[in-house]
Amino acid sequence: MRRVVGKNVVEFSAEQFDEMVERYSGGVILDVGAGNAKHAYKLARAAQDTLVIALDAAKDNMQKVAGKAKASPAKGGAPNLICVWAAAEKPPAELHSVTELHSLMPWGSLLRGMLGSDAEMLQGLARLCVPGAEFLVTLNLHAWRPPVPEVGDHPEPTPDSAMEQLAPYYAAGGWTLNEARYFGAEELDALATSWTRRLGSTRDELDVLGLTGVIGK
């Protein structure tokens, strides 16, 4: 797989990844569509016994955090963070043993997939996970106000409509949607993403729908 290390991209073998999985006993968190990887970095710093993977199709966005992660933990480094350059539709085959999956404020093809337009994407991500892996997906509802092209014909989801319309689609991909609810301001701040800060700074209120459940159970 292609690993972003500062401004460089290096090949990271299956054997190297297996070694890291064995090294960290706290599990494996995969952040899909990680953007600038700040959320993944925060997770890695908070749980240093956990391997955290930031996966994004745009490598340049992750360069700053990937460079910061190289430092020693005492200086803000995160040796348990891997930034991977890949699309959610084609994740590296070397990835495995994911115990928790996040997709925060998905956009583009990732948003289309999370709304029901790409069951194969969900199936592919499910194959990376251990049975019972937990997932968190947060949808920026302002994508419907007015609608952006990525949402297509999908109406703005509510907690009820997500459980009724998205749950069957997720189930076909091996995901069980257990709960859909609106996120409050404190929960959004805790996500530590640039999207939430950027959107929140331009609106009096940021509306986000959170989807949680398990994969492969």
Image: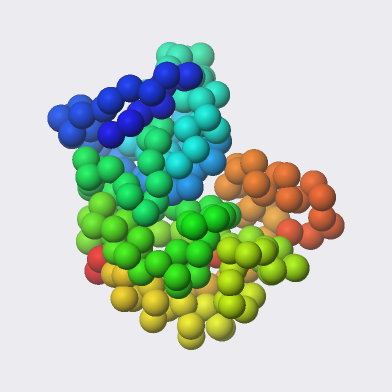
The residue located at (29%, 58%) in the rendering is 124
The residue located at (60%, 42%) in the rendering is 192
Q: Residue furthest left?
A: 15
Measuring from the top left, give residue 210's x and y in whole percent: 55, 64
Quadrant holding the N terminus: top left
The residue located at (47%, 25%) in the rendering is 66
Is residue 59 among the parts visible in the rendering? yes
Q: What's the coloring here?
A: rainbow
Measuring from the top left, give residue 51's x and y in whole percent: 33, 36
Which of 51 and 74 lies nearest the eye of the viewer? 51
Measuring from the top left, give residue 9's x and y in whole percent: 38, 23
Quadrant holding the C terminus: bottom left
Against 131, residue 10 (above or below) is above
The residue located at (45%, 42%) in the rendering is 57
Against 1, residue 11 (above or below) is above
Is residue 27 among the parts visible in the rendering? no
Which of 146 and 32 lies nearest the eye of the viewer? 146
Left-right relation of 81 to 27:
right
Measuring from the top left, give residue 144's x and y in whole percent: 69, 69
* Number of numbered discs overlaid on the protein picture: 0
